[in-house]
Image (spheres, rainbow, N blue to C red):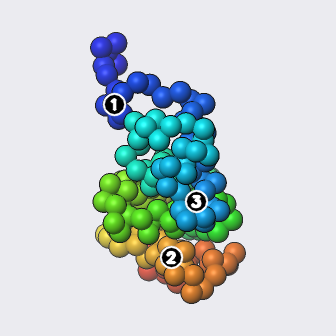
């Protein structure tokens, strides 16, 4: 990269890492407390910075929460290299369920998904930065499965990803059924016969 290259993601002065961390932590704490939501004023007060500082770095409270979510979950899309395709997909679903059910980012994801209805910036970011990498990882596993003779050729990978992930996000948003430890195995039991190569 040329030494003249300029960052394009944010305008203004570079962020203090301590202040950035304080803002992200404050936003997460407030969102998880559910005390009327994590507004910019409340985030700034909890973090000990000015609201101008927050707005200088993020366009909205939801954008703060989104950055915190992505930062806390960046390593959740890796799969064991020695697993079969079925094992790798099942493991992937198991870890996604545990993340959503058992950790603070799960609650943040639910809130951000709701916020995306009225905040198009957050909606696009959720699709591009949360959903797309995870779908790409699943598609990669499927493509590798075809190469290894474990997955049948000609599948619509996007449709398969929808079928694999939909029960998890459906239960996250509606809470009509629990995100159980057995859910990933149940999803794979239903889906794998339509994915697997003919023996």
Q: Secondary structure at mark 1?
A: loop
Residue 194, given in percent of the width and then of the height, sits at: 44, 80
Residue in the image at 46% along x and 35% along y? 53
Earlier in the chain: of badge 1 and badge 2, it is 1
Residue in the image at 46% along x and 62% along y? 112
Q: Which residue is mark 1?
A: 11
Seen as rendered, the residue at the extreme top is: 3
Q: Which residue is mark 3?
A: 31
Horizontal placement of 1 versus 24: left or right?
A: left
User: In front: 76, or 71?
Assistant: 71
Q: Quadrant of residue 130?
A: bottom left
Residue 180, given in percent of the width and then of the height, sits at: 67, 78
For the residues carrying marks 1 and 2, which lies nearer the camera in this image?
1
At label 2, counting other C-alpha atoms closer than 10 Å, the crowd grade (few under 14, some 14-19, many 20 or more) is some
Q: Which residue is mark 2?
A: 173
Looking at the picture, does residue 40 appear above or below residue 166?
above
Residue in the image at 60% along x and 64% along y? 35
At label 3, counting other C-alpha atoms closer than 10 Å, the crowd grade (few under 14, some 14-19, many 20 or more) is many
């Amino acid at each position: 990269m040329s030494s003249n290259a300029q960052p394009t993601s944010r305008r203004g002065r570079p962020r203090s890492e301590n202040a950035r961390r304080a803002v992200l932590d404050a936003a997460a704490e407030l969102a998880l407390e559910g005390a009327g939501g994590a507004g910019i004023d409340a985030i700034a007060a909890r973090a000990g910075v000015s609201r101008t500082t927050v707005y200088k770095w993020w366009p909205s409270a939801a954008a703060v929460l989104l950055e915190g979510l992505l930062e806390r979950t960046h390593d959740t899309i890796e799969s064991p290299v020695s697993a079969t395709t079925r094992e790798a997909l099942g493991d992937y679903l198991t870890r996604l369920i545990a993340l959503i059910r058992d950790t603070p980012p799960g609650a943040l994801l639910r809130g951000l998904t709701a916020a995306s209805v009225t905040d198009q910036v957050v909606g696009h970011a959720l699709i591009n930065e949360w959903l797309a990498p995870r779908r790409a990882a699943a598609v990669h596993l499927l493509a590798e499965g075809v190469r290894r003779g474990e997955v049948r050729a000609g599948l619509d990978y996007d449709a398969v990803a929808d079928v694999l992930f939909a029960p998890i996000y459906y239960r996250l948003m509606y809470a009509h059924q629990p995100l159980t430890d057995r859910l990933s195995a149940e999803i794979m039991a239903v889906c794998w016969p339509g994915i697997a190569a003919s023996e």
